Amino acid sequence: MTENQAGAEVSRAVAANLRALRARRAWSLDALAHRSGVSKGVLVALEADRGNPSLNTLCRLADAFSVSLTQLVDADRPPVLRGAPVAEASALWHGPSGGYGRLVLSTDPPNPVELWWWRLEPGEARHSEAHAAGTREAVMVIAGEAVIEADGQRTTVPKGHAATWPGDRPHVYRNDGAAPADLVMIVTVPG
């Protein structure tokens, strides 16, 4: 599957899942716009499968519905026991130098846990808005090193080390080094 095909599949899934989630809650587009901070025009485009949402937009929508990102982007309801090849996971973030953030899989609600694979090329940074209250993030660096900034603090996490921080505040992870940084990230989302 090409990157364009994968993107089209994610777009179709987001459109269908947004419509279904909104219908289950009996929310108007205005109500979802208010809860998520995403404009009504963007929501109309996404539900009509005419949008290309950013990771921040997807996070806002998942937070508004209190669902995992996987539940928002998956085309099919996964089986109880499931595996996921990292190379085939949906890349929901693309860095300017070729880095990516792939949502590999997540557990089901309530309180979903998301598993991510990140590749940050030298000089790339992922600036994240605050997620839903109570969200926590943890990262383990597999190769290279990453710099994490959260809640006014900054730390460098080298290969073989891990860190955690509150995901419900703006935060940044970046690669200030000369080699690519590979990260495994877990995000816990409150129910």
Image: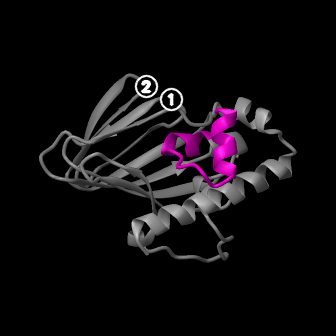
What is the secondary structure assignment of the residue under circle 2? Answer: loop
Residue 104 visible, this angle: no
Report the number of discs.
2
**Residue at the spot x=57%, y=46% of the render?**
58
CB atoms at circles 2 and 1 under 8 Å apart? Answer: yes
Labelled disc at residue 27: none
| Cα distance between the residues tagged 2 and 1 | 7 Å
Q: Is residue 92 left or right of residue 18?
A: left
Callout 2, which amino acid?
Answer: Asp
Q: Which quadrant would the N terminus be assigned to in this image?
A: bottom left
Residue 123 on image: x %, y %: 20, 40
When the figure is inspected, residue 86 is found, relative to residue 81, above or below; the finding is: above
List the residue tagged with mark 1.
169
Horizontal and vertical percent position of residue 79? 66, 76
Q: List x then y, in percent, for residue 163.
A: 36, 43
Tell me the quarter of the picture where residue 60 sits: top right
Question: For residue 52: magenta?
Answer: yes
Which residue range is magenta in the image? 39-60
Where residue 24 sits in the image (x, y, percent)? 84, 52
Q: Which amino acid type is shown beneath numbered disc 1?
A: Arg
The residue closer to the viewer here, 140 or 181, is 181
Dominant secondary structure, magenta? helix
Q: Residue at x 56, y 36 (%)?
A: 131
Check disc 1: other Cα within 10 Å, few if <14, some if 14-19, many if 20+. Answer: some
Is residue 75 shown in magenta? no
Q: For the view shown, which residue lies furthest in the left direction?
A: 178
Q: Residues within 10 Å of mark 2 (few under 14, many from 20)?
A: few
Query: In the rendered image, is residue 74 in sight?
Result: yes
Q: Residue furthest right?
A: 26
Q: Which mark is residue 151?
A: 2
